[in-house]
Structures are given as C-alpha cells and as structure tokens.
Image: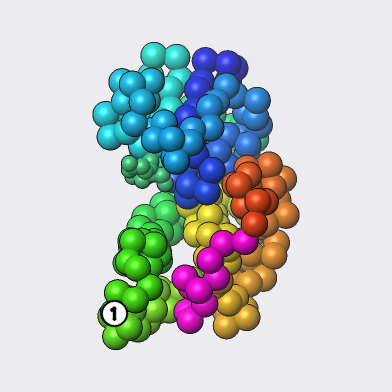
Amino acid sequence: MSSNMFLYWGSGSIPCWKPMLVLEEKGLSGYPNKRISFGDQEHKSDEITKLNPRGQVPTFKDGDVVVNESNAICFYLENKFPDKGTKLLPDDKAEFGRIVQRCAETANVFNTAVVNLAQYRFKTPKDKLDEELLKTKYEDFREELKLWEGYLAASGGYVVGSNFTMADVFFFPYVAFGVRLGLNLAKYPAISAYYDKVKDRPSVKTTWPPHWADGPGDSSIFGPV
Ligand SMILES: N[C@@H](CCC(=O)N[C@@H](CS)C(=O)NCC(=O)O)C(=O)O
C-alpha cells in the first residue's frame, strides 16, 4: 500500500522527522525513500526541485500526488489512513480541536527555539554574538517551554491526554533537538518525564536522526535555557 510513496528527507531535520513518525505510527514502514545530503546541496537538485520548487525536505509524493511541507504531509497521511496503526487525530471533535491547537502552537516552539535562537547561534560567529540579545532569546524560549511544561503536567502523559497523537508528532522532535543541543530538562520535570517515555517509542527509535549517533551536538546552544 505504501509502495507508491516516496519521501526525500534529511537527517536531523525536524520537518522531516514529523512525517517519518506518522509513517511509522501508521505501520507504513518500508516506504521508498532517499536520505539527501545537506552538505552536498542535494535538496537543491533537479530531482527535488521539480517536485518542490522551494528545494527543501521533506519532499513527498504518493503516486501522482505531490505533498510538501511537513505539516501537510502529516495531515495527508492521517486523512488517507485514518484507521491504520495509531489513530493520530481522533473522531471526537473536542479532542480533535485540542490536538490541532497544540499542533499549531508548535510554530511558537519553532520560532523561539529554532529561528530566534539556534539559527542565530549557528549563523553568528562566537565573537559577534550580542549577549544582551541572546538573553532575551533565552528568555523567550524559556517562557515558551513553561507553557509546554504546564500542558504536560496537566495532561495524561502525552501532549493531549493519555495517548500518543499528532500533537506528539509535532512536539517531540523539538524536545529531542533541544536535548541534543544542551537543553537541561531537569528544569522542566514534566517535559523530562515525557522525553524519557517517548524517546523509547518504537516509531521514535526507528526514525531517530541517524547522524546523531556520530557524536554529540553543541550543548552550548540551549545550555543557558
Ligand atoms: N516549512 C517546511 C520547512 C522545511 C525545511 O525548512 N526544511 C529544511 C531542512 S530542516 C531544508 O530543506 N532546508 C534547506 C533550504 O531551505 O534550503 C516544512 O515544514 O516542511
């Protein structure tokens, strides 16, 4: 059933990790795929840009249907396979609303953690870092994490309730990315317990970014958070 699908992905990419988690949770492992090399700019190759003019991964097709953008791929797969494997978006309308709300809120995690902080750190030479600006970036991410700490402390062990849902697909990769780059979860006990539980989930272990096994990340990025 999954043989018409094809996913281009890159290791360590949060946007790629999300649809990979959905595919595993849906029991669609073994789908044809290609891991691209960012270093060799393979995401800018004709093979990818003819499907995705942005030259980004994930790039995905299912037969003649091309779906790019990680969120879109996740919702496409859930819509196509609602009753296969893990049900990531339930039929119950209220529950559905809570889950898609948290999915949407991960845009704030992306902005505070990745765009404002990690990308600033990656792109700025150490001697050019504006320490005062950095403090505000740490504070913004801290404030965002406090919200998620509250959500998890009040929920049944997952982002929404007591089952793994699309909200976890959207949120967990940020936590793992944070931990790799020095985020100290001792300050966030509910997120810490969540991380410890979800990291051992089969879909998560199978899709763990392969290059993370090559060595640790730069723990100074999120260390002060
Ligand atoms: N909004 C897109 C973002 C995808 C994205 O930024 N992918 C990165 C890898 S994490 C990429 O391909 N970057 C290369 C580039 O933008 O040139 C999504 O959610 O799928």
Q: Nearer the viewer, residue 75 or 108?
A: 108
Residue, x 43% and y 79% (percent of image)? 142
* 101 left or right of 174 in image: left
* 153 left or right of 41 in image: right
Q: Determine if residue 160 is in view.
A: no
Q: Position of residue 214 (x, y in %)?
A: 65, 51
Q: Position of residue 13 (x, y in %)?
A: 48, 47
Q: Which residues are magenta?
A: 216-225
Residue 159 lies in quadrant: bottom right
Mark 1: amino acid: Asp
**Where the N terminus falls, by quadrant?**
top right
Residue, x 62% and y 28% (percent of image)? 28
222 vs 23: above or below: below
Q: Which residue is mark 1?
A: 130
Coloring scheme used: rainbow
88 vs 31: above or below: below
* 198 left or right of 217 in image: right
Give the residue at the far front of this rendering.
127
Q: Position of residue 137 (x, y in %)?
A: 34, 76
Q: Nearer the viewer, residue 201 or 180?
A: 180
Instruction: Identify the secondary structure beneath mark 1.
Output: loop
Q: Does the stretch in magenta take in 221?
A: yes
Residue, x 31% and y 26% (percent of image)? 49
Residue, x 49% and y 33% (percent of image)? 36
Magenta segment, prevailing SS (helix, strand or loop) = loop
Q: Quadrant of ligand 1?
A: top left
Q: Position of residue 160 (x, y in %)?
A: 53, 60
**Badge 1: residue crowd in 10 Å (few <14, some 14–19, many ≥20):** few
Q: Determine if residue 110 is in view.
A: yes
